[in-house]
Image (tube, helix red, strand yellow):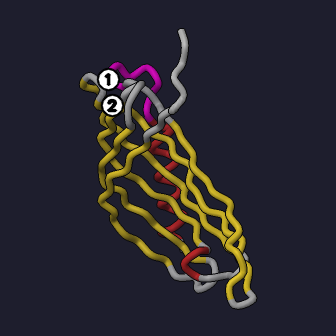
Amino acid sequence: MNSYRLSVFISVFLCLAVPAAAHAIDGFPGSTWGELRWETPRHGQQNLILEGWVEQGIHWMSWNNIKLNTYAKIRYGWDSEKLDWNNSFGPGVGVALELLKPDGPHIRTGIEYIWERRYESGREIQKAIVFMNWYGWWDLKKKEE
C-alpha cells in the first residue's frame, strides 16, 4: 500500500514541479475520458459500469504536427456486480508521440506504466503497456460557406 501512495504522490508532483516559464515546453495539455453504461440483463443479472481516466501532460517539444508528451494519469473503474477486473483505481505515467492535425485524425503512440489496485480482491497490479490509439471525426453534410 505504501508503494501505491508513493506512486500517486510522485505522479502528481511530476506534473506540478515543472516551472511554467520553461522555454522548451510547448504546453500543458490535460484530458479526461469516461463512460457510464448499463449492460442489459443476462441470466437475470444487471450491471452498471463506470470507467475512465484523467490525464495531465507536458508537451516538451514539437516538429510540425508531431508533439513529444509525458504525462501522469489516474484510471478508475467500478461496476455494480463487483467483478474484480472492473473495480480498480490507480495512477500511471507515460511518454507518447502525438500527431495532431486540425482537420484529420489524432494519433498517439507510446508506453505507459500503471499501478492498479483492485477493490474487491485488494490485489495490486503493476504493468507496462505499449499502445497506439487514434481519434477521428467527420460530418457527412456538406457545409455552405
Label 1's element?
loop
Q: Is residue 16 above or below residue 22?
A: below
Q: Tell me the residue that label 1 is attached to.
A: 24
Foreground residue among 59 and 38: 38
Q: Residue at x 72, y 80 (%)?
A: 41
In the displayed structure, does residue 28 sit left or right of residue 76?
left
Identify the magenta region: 18-25
Determine the image quadrant of residue 39.
Answer: bottom right
Circle 2: is it few (<14), some (14-19), or many (20+) Cα within 10 Å?
some
- Check residue 131 for magenta coloring: no
Residue sitting at x 66%, y 64%: 50
Please state which of residues 88 and 49 is positioned toward the viewer in this rendering. Answer: 49
Q: Is residue 99 left or right of residue 39?
A: left
Q: Judge whether 137 appears above or below 54 on screen.
A: above
Q: Secondary structure at mark 2?
A: strand
Q: Amino acid at mark 1?
A: Ala
* Magenta portion: prevailing SS class: loop
Q: What is the three-letter code of the residue carrying label 2?
A: Trp
Residue 112 position in % (x across, y down): 36, 56
The earlier-in-sequence mark between 2 and 1 is: 1
Query: Taking 65 as reference, is 46 above or below it?
Result: below
According to the picture, the residue beneath numbered tag 2 turns out to be: 60
Contact check, label 2 and label 1, Cβ < 8 Å:
yes
Please name the residue shown 73% across and 85% down the image: 45
